[in-house]
Image: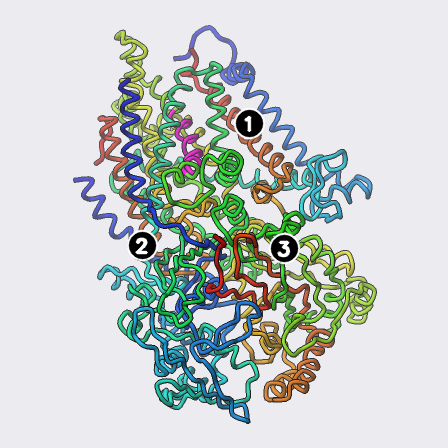
Amino acid sequence: MIEAGQHNSPARRAWQRFRKNRAAVISAWYLLALVAAVLIWPVILKVAGAHFVQMHEPDQLSDALFAPPDSQHWFGTDVHGRDLFSRMLFGAQISLLVGVVGALVSLVIGVLWGAIAGYVGGRTDAVLMRIVDVLYSLPTIMFVIVLLATVGEMLKHTRLVKSSPFLENSMHVILLFVGLGAVSWLTMARIIRGQVLSLRVRAFVEASRTLGARPYWILIRHIIPNTFGVAITYLTLTMPSIILYESFLSYLGLGVQPPMASWGTLIAEGVAQINPIRIYWWLIIFPVAIFVATLLALNFLGDGLRDAWDIKSRN
Amino acid sequence: MYFVRRLIFAVPLLLVISALAFGLIRIAPGSPFDSERAPATPEIERNIEAKYHWNDPIWKQYLDYLDGLIHGDFGVSTKYRDRSVSGIILQGLPVSATLGILAFGFAMGVGLPLGFFTAARRGRWEDFTGSFLAIVAVCIPGFVVAPILILLFSIKWRLFPVGLWESPWHTVLPMISLGLLFAGRVARLMREGMLNAIQSEFVVAARAKGLSENRLLLKHVVRIALLPVVSYSGPMLADLLTGSFVVESIFQIPGIGVFFVNSALNLDAMLLVGLSLLYAIILVGMNLFVDLAYTWLDPRVKYD
Amino acid sequence: MSVARTLSACFLVLTLFISGCIRSEAPADVTILNQAEPQSLDPAILTGQADMRVAIGLFEGLTRLDPVTAHSIPGLAEGWDISPDGKTYTFHLRTNLVWSTGEPIRADDVVYSWIRTLNPATASEYAGELYYLKNAEAFNTNGITDASKVGIHALDPFTVQVQLNHPTPFFLDICAMPMTYVVPRQTIEKYGDRWMMAKPLPASGPFELVYWRLNDKVRLKKNPLYWDAANTKSDIIDLLPVGSANVAINLYEHGEADVVWDAALIPSELLDVLLKRPDFHTFNYLGTYFVRFNVTRKPFDDPRVRQALAMAIDKKRIVERITRGGEETASHFVPDGTANYTSPDGLEYDPDQARKLLAEAGYPGGKGFPRFAYLFNASAGGGSKIHEKIAVELQQMWHDELGINMDLHQVEWTAYLDALTQLNYDVARSSWVGDYNDANTFLGCFVSNDGNNRTGWKDPQYDSLIQQANEEVDIKKREQLFQQAETILVSNQVPIAPLYFYKGINYYDTNKIRGIYPNLLDDHPLQSIFKVK
């Protein structure tokens, strides 16, 4: 299948193809810039002068309520006079992390689960998919309440948590990640299983089976790589929902604790301002725009990477 | 035979779901009978708990509940004290289901053509624009879309009502708000399915046989390309038919979507379990339907 | 062509399908947005304000509320005699009382309704408000089983006599509260817990229930057989349950609703604009927003710490920046305007004094003060998130003025109530709205064994002052006793720190809607409301 006569390595050729995809390259730069800003901004706040910090500390209240964007507050301020720009950058930490955790869980557990169910079939398939059905039908909110309140309360009194102030402070967020991760892989598993059901009867799979390849080898070598296209596509579809689901939980009082913000909560705060009387537009435009831009970038990056690595797609 | 076995399998599945949901409520903190105003004496709260058998051992409550189920009684709501669970579901489900079917139609009607089109024009500007629109639809949450639609189409231009559920006009904005996200997802999955199918060996073979490109796309590719969308439509339909908290609250629609959230927050045990069962039944039914559709779309798929 | 035809056929089928699910009916005379979905309309069971505001149209008690002043006026009883010791009330029923289904309403029905509320099997949360009756508490808590020992009896078909434990100056107000409403015995005995769903539902009040669809609408129509039907101003009233401020304002601005009567249904960010409009009406009512301290936990067991925290709150900023409805800041607990009572002043905003107190308690400049959490509930459904905003402000104020650090702990409603009841919190947001117009409905909460105390605070002196006050017949002396008690509560011991008094806000166009009057209980009998034609 490989064309002859090239001395370039596959990785190098993939990279060259990727570089030609303008949307993917721009997306990559945008994401790099965003991550850099998210990482550097807290450092700037540490070293900058008191006045600058007073102005931009994400949780610092001020008298400038609902100030529109200007040279001091680049994205304007909210109901407490807090700097929206800074809150967006700090909120990015939570939201990007939620997205990444959700994506990893759904990629690793979801793909494996679905692939095994679909490939092995029979009773294994039935059991695995019924487990997915059960988890899918369980009331998510109830699950999160129990996880955060009951399990959180129990863990709070364990020695491990008590001994580490970091764990004590971030336990709520960690449990939140666990909860979001736990529900994020279910649909992925279903879709991958469906894909595998049709893949395992394809000619190339049949061929290697008749050639005597071991089942797990077929699974890893032939089946799973062929599901990556669908997996990545669905992944880019789940990430926004996971990030937004966090905001829904926050809205119910189960997500991040104020005054901490996430993109989801900032968007929700902005949307609460949409009414026929008066609209503080900056509270909606900036959070939504940055959120959508970031997810678009992730999508195009995902597409670009996939195309670059996908040998069959070359024309 | 396989499908009959699946149906029989659904019964223990429902038992497991109801038991887990029941258990979750009981280990959550608080009680459904806590109220902001404490009653004058603790005995009053005990009277209420006695009435709803709250202090019985949990296995007994669950068995009582199952006993009721066998007799067709889904129990009572502890939040809406004048209501039975079946009454609440019977009243709200038709509304949610109507809206869900409309949104499903919208998602398919917009998503499938868009996905087909972007895949057929892969790599050109039409692909880029179409994909861009689909991704934006996926990323903008319903709770942003709905208020903006209301502001523009209801308040500003007065084309549609701002909410409530009274005439076909009232369904348009909720349908779009609910369906947009799914339309975007369907478009993306369809595009991916198309790209996969175009490369699959038998399509290559058909192309070699000299079938025209358009006929090829329509006749052979679409069937295979629909597979990811079809897998996804099981859970998607289950989600859509059982209503949406966000859209129902924003448009003031009397469906059951809000109860999925509120019953958990209120620790309304029987309502929550009843809704979970309803959801599970719809999900199992839809997934079964999806698997049937699979064998029809791709005859090579076999279940053993 | 064929595609177009298929599409139009689909559309036709769809339209038919939808119109099948959707109703058409006569428009209401008045449409009211009534906050949350009622949990119940059964007068013995209901607890929420939204529930009461519907039930007040369906059923009536011996007295009812005057729509203008919210004072009790004759209802099903046309008059009453009070014995000189203030412990026996004899009510004389009107002779022309009938249910909306035509059967007569007699003294037995009144007795049945009251006893039903007190019956433990009914499980009424408000049964406690009838403990003023002789033997009522014992009967309600399974102490005695003989209902005839409870202090309410029918002397003849038109006379009801009630015996009380103590003279209770606000007893006639109690007789207008929902748990005393007269309810239809036959229907209840026939349908049990589901009796509200019975058709027809006999009503004793000015309206009948046409239907009540969950999360959708309650529709009421005039009850022509009500004794005062001549003064029922509207034929059909719709009440919609709306939980979100943005939905409410959309429906109102779009003309789908005539009246919005809950302050929570108004986005607080817009109040600066809205309050200037002629269709927005604010008024005082009996409600207080305050902070509870858990005095069983260190360092809040020290009154100086509690005083310091209370005095470091800039309440003015909170009412001007956050609530914005023209609320008055609160230094005391009982709202101004409460009948026969004037509150003593409590602690004022004084950061210097607060720092001094905190230093005296052993935490100069906040040094060594343990990190603690502020508990509040997520206002799910409501858009304004007032609790969160106040929490954020308090966090900053206590940090800036006292140098102490606090985490915010937002939880959902049932977990919040559970934490309060179990005393599983450090500091918590709270509010209290008066059930009737008397200082006791506020101050009675903080008696040691009261279920609403929820601070762990116990003070024998306070308890005895409240008890003396409630046994006192002389109104002036009673006021003094209450004042002494309140001083302990808000100045000396400070288990709570009041922030502000609620402001009621309703919106409706006075040129179109009449018959709604601002009053201290924020109660608005439906009977008097109508739209100008």
Residue C13, percent across and down? 27, 34
Q: Is residue C276 visible?
A: yes
Image coordinates of residue B69 in percent, x first then y, are: 26, 60
Q: Mark 1 lies on which chain?
A: A
| Dot 3 alpha-carbon crowd within 10 angstroms: few under 14, some 14 to 19, many 20 or more | few
For residue B16, the mark is 2
Closer-to-camera residue (A48/A156): A48
10 Å crowding of disc 1: few (<14), some (14-19), many (20+): many
The residue stretch that appears in magenta? B175-190
* Amino acid at the residue labelled 3: Ser
Eye-nearest disc, 3 or 1: 1
Number of the label disc, if any, that sits on residue A297: 1
User: Element at badge 3?
Assistant: loop
Magenta run includes residue A110: no
Q: Name the residue under label 3.
A: A164
| Quadrant housing residue C440 | bottom right
Q: Where C136 falls versus C34 (above or below)?
A: below
- Indicate the position of residue B184 as horizontal and vertical percent values: 43, 30
Residue B185 included in the magenta stretch of the image: yes
Residue found at the very far left of the displayed protein: B1
Q: Are marks 3 and 2 on the same chain?
A: no
Q: What residue type is labelled 1?
A: Ala
Check disc 2 and report its element: helix, strand or loop: helix
Quadrant hosting residue C224: bottom left
Q: Quadrant of the C terminus of chain A?
A: top left
Q: Which residue reaches farthest bottom?
A: C84
**Label 2: chain?**
B
Q: Nearer the viewer, mark 1 or mark 2?
A: 1
